[in-house]
Amino acid sequence: MSILYKQQAYFLPVSLISVVGYYVKGLITPQVNTYFLISLITTIPAIFLGRYLNHQLKDGSFFRYVYWGLIVISLILIISTLA
């Protein structure tokens, strides 16, 4: 069995139990649900775009672009908090 399946077998039930706990504590409100649904509008196409680009780019260059993008976003966030 692949490590990926073992991780899914662990994280899916734990995540579902966590969501139930968040609902019970009142941490998930209708506003949170609205924001979640809005985020899906960009998340789902981004997943397919990322998969497409990952298959098109060779030699691990996709991951280099992703890592550089994360570094740039991190620097922007750090600078914006210091300003």
Image (cartoon, rainbow, N blue to C red):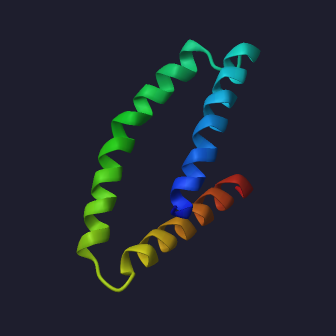
Residue 15, by quadrant, is: top right
Eyeballing the image, is 60 above or below 81? below
Position of residue 11 measured from the top left corner of the image (x, y, whole percent) = 62, 44
- Residue drawn at x 28%, y 67% as measured from the top left: 53
Residue 18, by quadrant, is: top right
Eyeballing the image, is 2 above or below 29? below
- Residue drawn at x 64%, y 26% as measured from the top left: 19
Eyeballing the image, is 14 above or below 35? below
- Residue drawn at x 52%, y 59% as measured from the top left: 4
- Residue drawn at x 41%, y 29% as measured from the top left: 38
Residue 73, by quadrant, is: bottom right
Position of residue 7 measured from the top left corner of the image (x, y, whole percent) = 59, 53
**Which of these two is toward me, 72 or 4?**
4
Is 69 on the left or on the right of 25, as rendered? left
Is 60 on the left or on the right of 27, as rendered? left
Eyeballing the image, is 69 above or below 20? below
**Which of these two is toward me, 21 or 67?**
21
**Which of these two is toward me, 30 or 73?**
30
Is 25 on the left or on the right of 42, as rendered? right
Query: How many labels were placed on the picture?
Result: 0
The residue furthest front is: 1
The residue furthest bottom is: 59
Position of residue 69 measured from the top left corner of the image (x, y, whole percent) = 47, 67
Give the quarter of the figure containing the C terminus: bottom right
Position of residue 5 measured from the top left corner of the image (x, y, whole percent) = 52, 54
